[in-house]
Image (cartoon, helix red, strand yellow):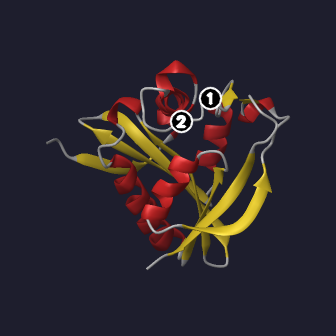
């Protein structure tokens, strides 16, 4: 088995990172994986400008997972202040899902949140309708807080909703 390496993304990674994220979240390619948003949202998940903005912001980092130099996954960690970090953009190449990489990306993100931002808690938002993904996060130690947040239904930058019923649930976990 080839080892997976993790590293912070650089501006030179933006094009490949964008392709990976879009392939895992949207369109027919996403349906090769066990979980995706393709039935809930069309359009884009993100764009290269947003990714460049994340990489230019010292309060955010995107960690890349690579196997033999090939980009296989990523996750964003953002400092929210007061010991809280945010986990987002968790992405695994759809052809490599269900192999443990998502778990390793979460572990790397949690370690990065503690080391880089002195975080004691990690928070994330998940689309309410993605029940299989919520259950997966619960198995990783995250819990539903009972809080919901609105989905940006009318902002095409975040996708084209197939239903107006989308909203986020908030999950969190205490970090060691």
Q: Give me the residue at 61% from left, 39% from top.
A: 51
Q: Return the x and y of residue 65 as percentages of the image width and height.
A: 36, 45
State the mark number for residue 151: none
- For disc 2, the neighbor class at 10 Å (few under 14, some 14 to 19, many from 20) is many
Q: Return the x and y of residue 113 as percentages of the image width and height.
A: 50, 67
Question: Is residue 24 visible from the viewing direction of this image?
Answer: yes
The relative height of residue 86 versus residue 47 in the rendered view (above or below) is below
The residue at the far right in this view is 154
**Residue wearing tag 2:** 36
Quarter of the image with the C terminus is bottom left
Quarter of the image with the N terminus is top left
The residue at the far top in this view is 28
* Figure quadrant of residue 39: top right
- For disc 1, the neighbor class at 10 Å (few under 14, some 14 to 19, many from 20) is some
Q: Return the x and y of residue 12 as percentages of the image width and height.
A: 48, 33
**Residue wearing tag 1:** 39
Number of numbered tags placed on the structure image: 2
Judging from the image, what secondary structure is the residue with disc 1 in? loop
Q: Give me the residue at 50% from left, 56% from top.
A: 135
Q: Are marks 2 and 1 in contact (CB under 8 Å)?
A: yes
The relative height of residue 29 versus residue 8 in the rendered view (above or below) is above
Judging from the image, what secondary structure is the residue with disc 2 in? loop
Question: Is residue 89 visible from the viewing direction of this image?
Answer: no
The residue at the far left in this view is 1
């Amino acid at each position: 088995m080839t080892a997976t390496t993790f590293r912070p993304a650089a501006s030179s990674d933006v094009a490949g990172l964008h392709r990976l994220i879009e392939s895992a979240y949207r369109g027919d390619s996403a349906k090769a994986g066990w979980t995706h948003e393709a039935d809930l949202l069309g359009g884009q998940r993100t764009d290269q400008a947003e990714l460049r903005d994340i990489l230019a912001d010292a309060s955010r980092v995107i960690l890349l997972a690579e196997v033999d130099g090939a980009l296989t996954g990523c996750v964003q960690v953002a400092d929210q202040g007061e010991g809280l970090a945010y986990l987002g953009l968790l992405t695994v190449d759809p052809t490599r899902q269900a192999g443990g990489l998502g778990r390793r990306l979460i572990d790397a993100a949690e370690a990065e949140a503690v080391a880089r931002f002195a975080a004691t808690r990690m928070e994330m938002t998940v689309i309410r309708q993605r029940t299989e993904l919520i259950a997966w996060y619960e198995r990783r130690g995250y819990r539903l807080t009972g809080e919901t947040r609105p989905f940006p239904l009318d902002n095409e930058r975040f996708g084209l909703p197939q239903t107006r019923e989308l909203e986020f649930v908030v999950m969190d976990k205490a970090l060691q």
